Image (cartoon, coloured by chain):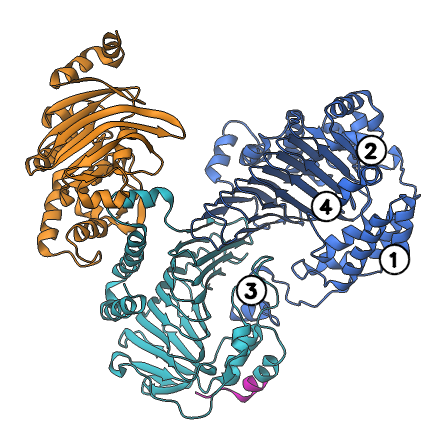
Chain colours: A blue, B cyan, C orange
Amino acid sequence: MKQDLRSLVEEGLTPEEVLSRDAPIRRSIEIKGKITSEVIDEISRAKNEPDWMRRLRLRNLELFNKLPAPNWLPNWVLENINLEEYSTYAKPDINRASSWDDIPPEVRKYYESLNIPEIEARALMGLGAQLDSEMIYFNIRKQLEEKGVIVMPMEEAVQKYPDMVKQYFMKIFPPEHKFAALHGALWSGGVFVYVPPGVRIEAPIEAFFLISNAGEGQFEHTLLIADKNSYIHFIEGCSAPRFSKYSFHDGMVELYAHEGARIRFTTVQNWSKNVINFNNKRAIAERNAKVEWVEASIGSMASFVYPSTILKGEGAGTEITGITVANGRHIKENGAKVIHDAPNTYSKIVNKSISANGGTAVYKGVVYVRKGAKYVKSHVACDSLILDEKSKAYTIPHDQVFEDTAVVTHEAYTGRINEDKLFYLRSRGLSEEEAKSLIVLGFISDVTEGLPFEYAMVLNRVISLEFSKYGKVA
Amino acid sequence: MLIPEELRVKARELAGRIPYQLIKDSPTVKYYTQWSLFDNCVESSNGNSPPPPIELNEYDLVVHNGLLVKGSELTSNDAATGIDPSESRIIARHFVNVREIQSLRIGNSSDSSVKVMMSYSGESNEMHSNHVIINVDEGALANVFLSIIGNGGCGTNITELNIGDGAVVNLLVYSVNVDPAFNLIRVNEGVKAMVNSYSIIVNGKMTHHREDYVLQGRESSVNVNSLEVGSGSSRLDYMVNLMHYGENSISNSITRAIALDSATVIHRGFGRISEHGKWSSTNIEGKVFIGSSNAVGMSVPVIMVDTGDVNGARHSASDASLDEEQELYLRMRGLSREEAIKLIVYDMVMGFLDNINGEFTSSVKYIRSSLLKLLRI
Amino acid sequence: MAELKVENLTVSVDGKIIVEDVSFNVKGGEVLALMGPNGSGKTTLFMTIAGHPKYTIVKGRIILDNDDLTTLLPEERVMKGIMVAFQTPIAVPEVRLSTLITAMVNKMNGKKLTDPAPPSLVSSLVKSVQEVGLTTAHLSRGVNHGFSGGEMKRSEVLQLLMVKPKIALIDEPDSGLDVDGIFAVGKALLNLVNSGTGIVLTTHSARILHTLKPTRVLVLSKGRIIAEGGLELVEEIEKVGYENFLRVRSK
């Protein structure tokens, strides 16, 4: 056993490293391929961008080349990145259409079992969304226009509202690390939303069905600005699994909640299993504003998403809720980062993870209370369910409190499904699979309760299927 | 016992090359331990060392500035270290600097109590290193009091405690620091071994105090109760690692920390259940009481579970001062906020000491008066 | 004999008036029972007299003997001789009950808070613990930490017994207690009264007043005193309930 310990220890590994990885060798990884400024120029030209955006892309490219690869990502993730491939795809005019017949029959059958309309299923399978021309969605757009709400593809906003975009674009999330810079250089697609002061949009805005290219995913940039005292619930992604050609996603979401505004941003991510999903998400909340992040991470081979909120104004608050499912040999990292920058701010983080069939679910979080941010209250609760002996769950939270008036608490539990509960359900006639699904659904119920009905329904169905025979197909 | 030459050579090569820590701790606080302060420390294994300012009679084994001062009749030459210098630059530097490794064995029949003092003193940038290995025989019952005291000057102090199958060890650790100190206590437990540990860590410009409890044997267990106190401008990075490699092992770590004046007090607890540690359970609790407006408290309670065949892993952490309601309640009992905080600090310390095993009565008495003086309560 | 005088007290919370124009006196050795339905302002009144910063005195004064307490800090009021027992006590796990009580008594006697308790204090504490129906085990636990509702009430009364303030304001000392508990606490408070403390108490059920017979009874409704008298008021409320009692009087 002592040998095992020694073999775990490589040069300069921190205790965390020693404790977390059995694969010993840690060498520095070179990312394959190169992106030239010519490629950037071409992208910018094709999108007809104003000069300032082109220059922003080039600045980000420079930073990308300078910054070191993040060494907190597993080696194999870095090894799977091929920049050449991305520059190619980022260029316009590449034929993205594919045919229904190319989709494997098991996949088609899977979608059928989800009971969603064929047209949506087609969109989900990446066959090119034609949905924005559908009538129902057209009406929603009209209603929003009447209220003065702006919802449009990001590229369009760069053209039509340059001043507003310039004010916020990558100012909320500057290129602090290599992948944020990569995103800044290659971004494409995504949604721009602006909600005027006092406007409350009660029904959630489902981006996927409103914006045609809000579905490609790879380097999408979403910027949402809620002006004073407004309210918006924005839903990104879809509960049902989505096929993606691209194997590396590096998206970004920037939210700005002005004084008294409330933003609820829900992401249900269910990418196909060839995807490495990386998303940079950050919100800034002004005085008395509230930002709620809901992050459900079901699909993808590996996922690294850490929604963050900077509580800039007094009385601001944030709630970050996450569900992470790691079913199969995947690594899913989901977390939360909250910076308490002002007095009387509060944060609540709830994270639930389920790992099975060799999956690894990881929670990484930081709650930072700056000196002077008086009377802060923060609570984090992380629960992990591990369904079998092959799967893993890690919880890595940091509470950093520089203010004595703060109350910052954290609790976490990791365990397996209670045998007694399982037996009880089986004694009521349910199979082991069905019983497990039911328990898993109960485990995440307090998160799914906040979702719009159709989303919750599909999500529940997806999760049940995950842990049944269809799960292997998705 | 002298350090094997090859180990020294290897350590020397690594000390110049490897980092203290490869990966940053967090995006916001890059390093909980400010390793740069250790760069100001200069290895000084040569030269005369002044006698330690302690009561030699109180201890069975005394090591000062790397040399054995008392207890040669207890030590032997047959132990080998299980610590690898490639773990970190600070450990590599330790192996370059340490003069000898003292090892002693507690057998089934021998006197079950041993009091060890590891001390060091010198100019503020002189670095001294102590290394003690204690092997506890299978089935033995041992009470170990370990005092790690720095009186000025940097220190690296490594203690290895190897506990044989079925042995039971009560461990009391008392450490007071001034200048940068790296203290590592690594406990390896065999089958059905049991450890009941109390740790009290006080002050220091930069104290990195780490306790590793490696539960290698199945059904081994550890219970750690810790008190961490930082006053003045101290910075304490206290880490408890509970590592389960044996099936059905149990661990429990409860840390109470107090941050006073402008001190920074950090509590890090790692509970790890590897695939080999099936059906184990771990519980980590940490509470940092922030006693003044310039004090800082940080908690990092980590759990890593590598298999679903577990009995559960939990942790809880909190960083807080007196909350509004509590403050008001105590004010309506006649106490001002300062008096309330003083009372809390007093009772957290006294309450902790009162709960320590009867085996350590005389040592606890000494710790009590030492603490009251240090904390001026 | 000490005397507490509350004169025309009007109290607001977040701009809303909760207590209006309340006046009463209580002397050492007396028992003043404050009755009233939930939400009538009893707790607000007590918290205001104790000095809780959330409550703003819009008008009126609080005088203890010759001291105007109206602008004093909560801990200063305690030193002057007035103490409040909470309706919902707060837990302070970091401090053991014995340590807190010793500190309180030490402070009253001008000693250092952490001075060890003299033997007389220890024996008095052991006796009082039994009087309120707790055990010495409770003394080694954090203040109110893991205590049941009833145990918290007994612990509050214990603190009063040890400090022996001039005037004690006790908010529902009987809630959470069974018949025996109410009897024990009532008796303990009676001893306190007989040793010179003046008590103002609110009660959930009037049972405790059988043991601790009130000198006077006040009835509060919507922040105002609407009735003053003796035990007969308590009997009437017991018989007809607050709604009818108040309806008769509001005519």
Label 2: which residue?
A212
Tell me the subunit letter for badge 4: A
| Label 3 neighbour load within 10 Å: few <14, some 14-19, many 20+ | some
Q: Are marks 2 and 3 on the same chain?
A: no
Q: Which mark is residue B31?
A: 3
Frontmost residue, B374 versus C134:
B374
Q: Which residue is mark 1?
A: A37
Magenta residue span? B1-9
Q: Amino acid at mark 2?
A: Ser
Q: Name the residue that disc number 4 marks.
A: A252
Q: Which structural element holds mark 2?
A: loop
Compared with A461, B25 (above or below) is below
Q: Residue type at mark 1: give it.
A: Ser
Q: Indicate left or right for B150 with A423 as reference.
A: left
| Secondary structure category for the residue under label 3 | loop
- Is tag 4's residue or tag 2's residue first in the polypeptide sequence? 2
Residue type at mark 3: give it.
Answer: Tyr
* Distance of label 4 from label 2 (alpha carbons): 18 Å
Q: Nearer the viewer, mark 1 or mark 2?
A: 1
Q: Residue at x 69, y 37 (%)?
A: A225
Dots 2 and 3: beta carbons under 8 Å? no
Asked if one can make out residue B27 in the rendered structure from this viewpoint, the answer is yes
Q: Are marks 1 and 2 on the same chain?
A: yes
Q: Residue at x 54, y 36 (%)?
A: A443
The amino acid marked with disc number 4 is Met
Asked if residue A192 lies left or right of residue A408, the reply is right
Compare marks 1 and 4 and give the one earlier in the sequence: 1
**Mark 2 Cα within 10 Å, few/some/many (few <14, many 20+)?**
many
